[in-house]
Amino acid sequence: MSLTVDLRLQRGAFHLSANAALPRRGVTILFGASGAGKSTLLRAMAGLAPSRGLIRFGDTLWQDEQHSLPAHQRPVGLMLQKPTLFPHLDVAGNLRFAARRAGADQALWRRVVGRLELGGLLRRSVRELSGGEASRVALGRTLLSDPQLLLLDEPLAALDQARRQALMTVISEIAERIPVLYVTHQLDEVITLGEHLWWLEEGRLRAQGTLADALAGPDSPLAQHQDAAVVLRTREVAFHREHHLLELRIGEQSLRIPATGPRGEAPRLRVAARDVSLSLSAAEDSSVLNILPASVESVRDLGQGQCLVRLLCEQQWLLARVTRYSCERLALAPGVGVFAQIKAAALV
Amino acid sequence: MPSADWLALWVSVKLALISTVVLLALCTPLAWWLARHRRRGQALLEALLALPLVLPPTVLGFYLLLALGPRGPGGALAGLGNAHSLAFTFSGLVIGSVLYSLPFVLQPLKNAFAAIDRDTLDMAASLGASPRDRFINVVLPLARPGYFSAAVLGFAHTLGEFGVVLMIGGSLSGETRVASVALYEHVEAGDYASAGRLAMVLVVLSVALLWAVFRWQRRPGSPL
């Protein structure tokens, strides 16, 4: 079900306003500097921070100017920044607290405990859990409340890299069924999980749109980031066993990448701006496998002798970070046709 | 020890038990409200509720005597039940004890409620727990140490009460003569042997009570 919000909230000098629609499914990243009001917006949507305005979820009105559905009646799965487990209950007790009230069945219990590997923790006191374990329990508890909408506030911040990967997979599976609004500062989580992006700045929802626009759009704050990257939507066409290479297609162009990582039906390819170099002709004698024709959309000076070049290639954005010297030498300007050499690429 | 003294001891214990139960019931909503809300005038209310901490018990007892007597509201209340005064009755003692021991029960409960993290309650709400459900299944278990301290302090403080009882209780055997008053009367009559026996019983009883409390606190898995 889709969610539309048109909210206003005043807390002291801080003013929050958000008018947006959350897509029916998929992960929407809620992005913004700290203090921008991300957590407050999640709380308001969950019914925990009094706000004025409208929230409609599918056919149900959660809130209008006269009425507001109390938090315990909204089918929201909320995860706060800290795990906030009940200290008087053990891990199993915490999970049961959610499962009982949602009427969750044995099957859901087994699935959640299995996927999040909580079986060994069930008898433990929550005081004995490490930060990462507590986050997993908190996520499990949220999922056992059988939510129709997930609001997650930096849920993976306390986890190590391996677990983060595993849990990102779990979250993206859930997002195939229900909408997920996801707060994070981690660019890899943005790129791996995100399909849409809400961008909050000083309490105002500035932009909402697809991740591709957010990553490489002309005014995107993410494009200024050290690790600026885009995600290319590709089709898998072949697997070359002898070279262990995967052949992907973007529009009419083909790309070959090392066949590591997961293989999905529509692979998302993460291409970092620093891994893209530009030339005016297609080099035939390069070790770089992937050379795509593209046209320059804009060139932005990043300072310190660096430029960020935004390219359009088969109707998808591509970013390249090159030196200003190269920019001037190649006379890069909007409309110029170039060849983008993608040195390394990773499937996400 | 004469049976009259055992009876006085029993009245003391009964008074302490009943007052503690009444106080816990009364202070739960009051402490919750004080801990969770900030209202204008709250400081004045809290000052009034803490008054028994600093007021000489006889002052409290004097006002209670007026209030509970035939011409006070207590007398009117008693009139409903075919009596003309609440002073010098066991019910009157319970009212006096409740007022006298109120801060000792209210304060630990208020602190226990205030210590409960707002996020914990918000989380419970978003997991589908109604306000009532949250209070019973989150607030009460988390405030258990506070309830424990409140009950022990309320009970012990009522057991040791003297000044208020002297003013409003009189010394009717089996009704309002509590152990501390009986002890005082023995001393006044020069009967130091009886006074010594009663005092010793009170000391043993108090030590036993506190010993049980501290033992319970040290239990593994105890919330304290």
Image: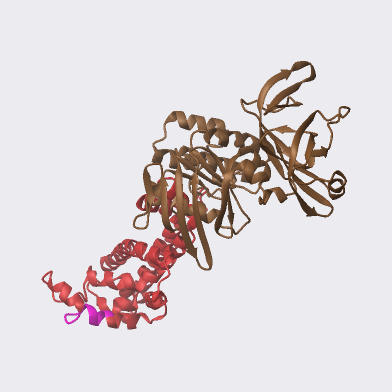
Q: Is residue A81 above or below residue B193?
A: above
Is the N terminus of chain A in the top left, top right, bottom left or bottom right quadrant?
top left
Quadrant (top left/top right/bottom left/bottom right) for the C terminus of chain A: top right
What residue is at 41 percent from the left and 31 percent from the top?
A105
Q: Position of residue A42 (x, y in %)?
A: 51, 51
Q: Is residue A13 magenta?
A: no
Residue A164 in view here: yes
Q: Assess whether residue B71 is covered by the magenta stretch.
A: yes
Q: Which chain is brown?
A: A
Colour mode? Answer: by chain
Q: Is residue A244 left or right of residue B182?
A: right
Location of residue B45 in the rendering, given as x and y in whole percent from the top left corner: 37, 75
Above or below residue B25? Residue A265 is above
Label count reads: 0
What residue lies at 39% left-to-right and 81% top-to-bottom? B55
Residue ranking furthest to the front: A335
* Quarter where residue A57 is shown: top left
Q: Is residue B39 left or right of residue A115?
A: left
Identify by letter the chain in red: B
Q: Position of residue A209 (x, y in %)?
A: 57, 45
Q: Position of residue A284 (x, y in %)?
A: 86, 27
Is residue B218 or residue B52 the one in the foreground? B52
- Viewer-nearest residue: A253 or B26: A253
Asked if residue A124 shows in the view, the reply is no
Q: Nearer the viewer, residue A122 or A252?
A: A252
Which residue occupies the extreme top position in the image? A242
Q: What are the residue bounds of the magenta stretch?
A: B64-72
